[in-house]
Structures are given as structure tokens and as C-alpha cells.
Image (cartoon, grey):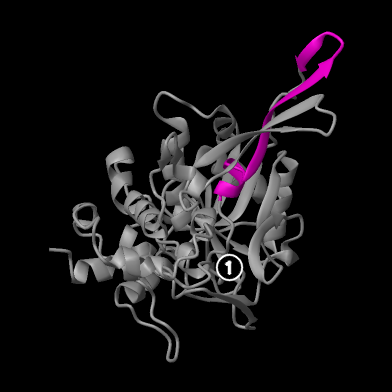
């Protein structure tokens, strides 16, 4: 981050940014208040961004409140992530119809519109890198994911506020935006420091400069912009909080792989199972979970068939059903599978943790099960 790579744009410059992305053929989505949460939706008007809204999050708790002092991106993460767009919850990928000459494939070609997402946080950029390993590396490449990924433009935001469920600092995934974005915004007062981080980002920034004046940042301005997420990181490491507010979470990752694998028979698994509903909410909102299943769906006549891929979850019984029985028949075994895979087995598979500290699994768990609390309990009293 140097003065010659950053420029100021005013708050109304966000509309010009949306217009530039639209003119370049992108479908633009961004955070908006809908149905009691901040979610990603199609965005053509910057006034629909959640300026003046804050989210309060804790175990099993999500509430929005208006605050005149809140900026445009002072909310944290909602239930949506980039996974919703690159790896959709339900997708048809083959279609067949029966006619006089038998079955004929009628699958339309897959030609996704370029997508621009505004408001991406550091934890979700890290999650995107993890999903890339799953879908783009190895012997099997997901062609549709790759097509979407190649046409993705990301406008990241450096966080200046954390929810009580955030622990990205523990995972090294925030609050500053990490690699993978095209433009980064840092909100300071009523304007934004904007930085291009890729050739595509530089091209959009140049197009923006043709519409509105862009003022370069001074060296002092750069220091101030860099200090926004850094100050938040220090607060999170100190686990400080506003008076009367819950402290941000943290997760001790030291030796976590061996800790979990060495405690597969720990009594804590049964204790958490007494609360767990096996509802799969944690896997649905997790930005890195990638399990799916395939179903053939016919119409009422039986003359048309659609093959669909949809999200699956290791919390459901059918996920571990095999010939002769079920490998994980109890809630305790299924929760253990999810947590140990996310924080331990993932390291063996992909060389990194499967958790980015976004805290969604804590917020959206109906009974408030806390992944950081469960690991801490096992660490505090490991099984003999």
C-alpha cells in the first residue's frame, strides 16, 4: 500500500463504481438489508447499501439496529458468502427429454455472466482460496466453478468493526483483506481509500477516474488507511469489547490437528451432541464447506429429466449411509466429523485449516454451539 496506488473516492463515488462495473458487463451484487439481515443481492443503486446499519451477533443471535454513526460497511458478515455464487446451493447441470426418437440431451450451454461482488471481507477471501483448492486443483476440476471464478471481480473491504463471533485474527484471515481481490476499500469518515490489487482492478479504477476526480492519498493518509484494520486486529487479539458487549472470540490453533485427532473419544463430543439439533445450519452458512449430492428429478409425465447438484451436509444421516449401515449414526459422531475435518483433517487434505474465523457457524446455530468453546474445552481437559 503506497500513495501512488491509492486514491480517495467520496461516498457518492460508490454509485459510479457500480455503474462502471455494470457498463463492463458485470452482474453487480452487494450487501443490503433484507428479511432482517444483511445479505448479498443484485445492486444497481448505492443507496441500497446498508449505510447506518450495525449487526449484533453472538451464539444463536443475529440482530440489526440502526446507528447514525455507522458507515456503509460497518456491519460484519451475514449468512451469505461467495460460496452462494460460485458453488450454488442448487444447480441443474444436465437436462434430458424423451421424444419419438428416444432420449435427447437438452442441456443449455453454461455461459455465466461476469459477476462483481462488493463488500467482501478478509475471512471470505481466505475461504475463496480454500474453495479454489477443492474445485480447481487435483485430478477433478469443476468446470462450472472455474468458469464463474474466471469471471469474478471482487471489491473487498478492510474491516473496522468485529462482531462478538469473529475470530479471523486467530486464523490469520483478517480483519485486513488478504490476497484475491481486485479492489479494496477502506472506509474513513465519509470517504473511502480505494486501491487496485490486480490488472482488472486497475482497469476499473482507470474507468472510474474518467467519471469522477480521484485524489491520491498522501503518505500520512496511507498510514491512516493501513491502521484501520490493524487497530481492529489489536483489539481482537486483546479480546477487548465495548462496555456491556460480548468479547470477540479467539481460537488457539497451536497443535490443533493433533489435539483433535488424539481426542476422538473425548466426553465433550457427547455433551455437545445433547444440544446439537443436526440441523446443518453451520455447514450451510460456512463459506468453505463443499459437500454436495446429485439427484435426478423428473416431471410428472416422466418425459423430462433434470440432473441437479445440491448442497449436502455431514450432519445428515444419509451423508454417511453406506451398504450395510451408517458410519456415523449418532449426533456426537457427526458433530465430531464436522469439527475435526474442518480444523484437523483439512490440514492433511489441503495444507490449511478449513476455518477462516468468520463466526457464521456460531451465529446461525439455533442453540448457540460455539466452535471456539468446544476446542477450548477439549484443550483444557484432554482425554487420558
Left or right: 135, with 55 as reference point: left
> Dot 1 corresponds to which residue?
73
Q: Tell me if I can see residue 316 in this picture.
A: yes
Identify whether 193 is placed above or below 164.
above
- Along the line of sight, which residue is nearer the eye, 296 or 348? 296
Which image quadrant: the C terminus? bottom left
- Along the line of sight, which residue is nearer the eye, 341 or 159? 341
Which image quadrant: the N terminus? bottom left
Left or right: 162, with 112 as reference point: left
Snapshot quadrant of residue 174: bottom left
User: Which residue occupies 39% across, 83% down?
Assistant: 241
Left or right: 243, with 49 as reference point: left
The residue furthest left is: 384
Identify whether 62 is placed above or below 383.
below
- Along the line of sight, which residue is nearer the eye, 260 or 352? 260
Q: Which residues are magenta?
A: 82-104
Q: Is label 1 in a helix, a strand or a loop?
A: loop
The residue furthest bottom is: 243
| Residue 145: % across, % down | 56, 34
Q: Tell me if I can see residue 212 in this picture.
A: no
| Residue 167: % across, % down | 38, 66
> Residue 103 colored magenta?
yes
User: Which residue occupies 73% across, 65% down?
Assistant: 48
Identify whether 132 is placed above or below 157.
above
For the residue carrying disc 1, how many other residues have a C-alpha within 10 Å: few (<14), some (14-19), or many (20+)?
many
> Residue 255 colored magenta?
no
Q: How many discs appear?
A: 1
| Residue 162: % across, % down | 46, 72
Identify whether 282 is placed above or below 238.
above
The residue furthest right is: 100
| Residue 26: % across, % down | 70, 42
Amino acid at each position: 500500500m503506497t500513495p501512488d496506488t491509492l486514491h480517495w473516492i467520496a461516498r457518492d463515488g460508490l454509485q459510479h463504481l457500480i455503474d462502471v462495473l455494470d457498463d463492463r458487463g458485470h452482474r453487480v451484487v452487494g450487501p443490503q438489508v433484507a428479511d432482517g439481515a444483511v445479505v448479498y443481492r443484485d445492486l444497481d443503486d448505492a443507496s441500497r447499501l446498508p449505510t447506518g446499519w450495525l449487526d449484533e451477533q453472538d451464539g444463536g443471535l443475529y440482530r440489526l439496529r440502526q446507528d447514525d454513526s455507522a458507515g456503509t460497511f460497518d456491519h460484519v458478515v451475514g449468512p451469505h458468502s461467495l460460496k452462494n455464487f460460485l458453488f450454488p446451493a442448487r444447480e441443474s447441470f444436465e437436462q434430458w427429454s424423451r421424444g419419438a426418437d428416444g432420449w435427447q440431451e437438452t442441456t443449455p450451454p453454461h455461459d455465466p455472466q461476469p459477476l462483481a461482488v462488493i463488500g467482501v471481507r478478509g475471512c471470505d477471501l481466505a475461504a475463496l482460496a480454500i474453495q479454489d483448492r477443492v474445485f480447481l486443483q487435483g485430478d477433478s476440476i469443476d468446470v462450472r466453478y472455474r468458469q464463474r471464478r474466471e469471471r469474478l471481480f471482487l471489491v473487498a473491504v478492510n474491516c473496522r468493526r468485529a462482531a462478538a463471533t469473529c475470530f479471523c485474527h486467530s486464523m490469520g484471515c483478517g480483519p485486513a483483506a488478504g490476497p484475491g481481490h481486485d479492489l479494496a476499500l477502506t472506509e474513513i469518515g465519509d470517504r473511502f481509500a480505494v486501491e487496485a490489487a490486480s490488472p482488472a482492478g486497475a482497469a476499473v479504477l482507470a474507468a472510474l477516474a474518467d467519471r469522477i476526480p480521484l485524489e491520491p492519498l498522501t503518505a500520512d493518509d496511507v498510514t491512516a488507511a493501513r491502521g484501520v484494520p490493524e487497530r481492529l486486529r489489536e483489539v481482537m487479539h486483546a479480546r477487548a469489547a465495548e462496555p456491556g458487549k460480548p468479547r470477540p472470540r479467539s481460537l488457539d490453533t497451536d497443535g490443533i490437528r493433533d489435539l483433535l485427532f488424539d481426542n476422538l473419544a473425548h466426553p465433550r463430543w457427547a455433551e455437545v451432541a445433547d444440544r446439537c439439533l443436526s440441523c446443518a445450519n453451520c455447514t450451510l452458512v460456512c463459506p468453505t464447506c463443499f459437500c454436495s449430492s446429485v439427484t435426478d428429478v423428473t416431471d410428472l409425465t416422466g418425459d423430462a429429466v433434470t440432473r441437479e447438484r445440491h448442497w449436502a451436509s455431514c450432519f445428515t444421516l444419509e451423508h454417511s449411509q453406506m451398504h450395510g449401515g451408517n458410519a456415523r449414526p449418532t449426533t456426537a459422531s457427526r458433530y465430531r466429523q464436522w469439527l475435526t475435518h474442518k480444523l484437523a483433517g483439512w490440514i492433511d487434505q489441503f495444507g490449511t485449516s478449513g476455518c477462516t474465523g468468520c463466526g457464521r457457524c456460531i451465529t446461525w446455530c439455533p442453540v448457540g454451539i460455539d466452535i471456539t468453546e468446544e476446542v477450548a474445552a477439549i484443550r483444557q481437559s484432554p482425554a487420558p
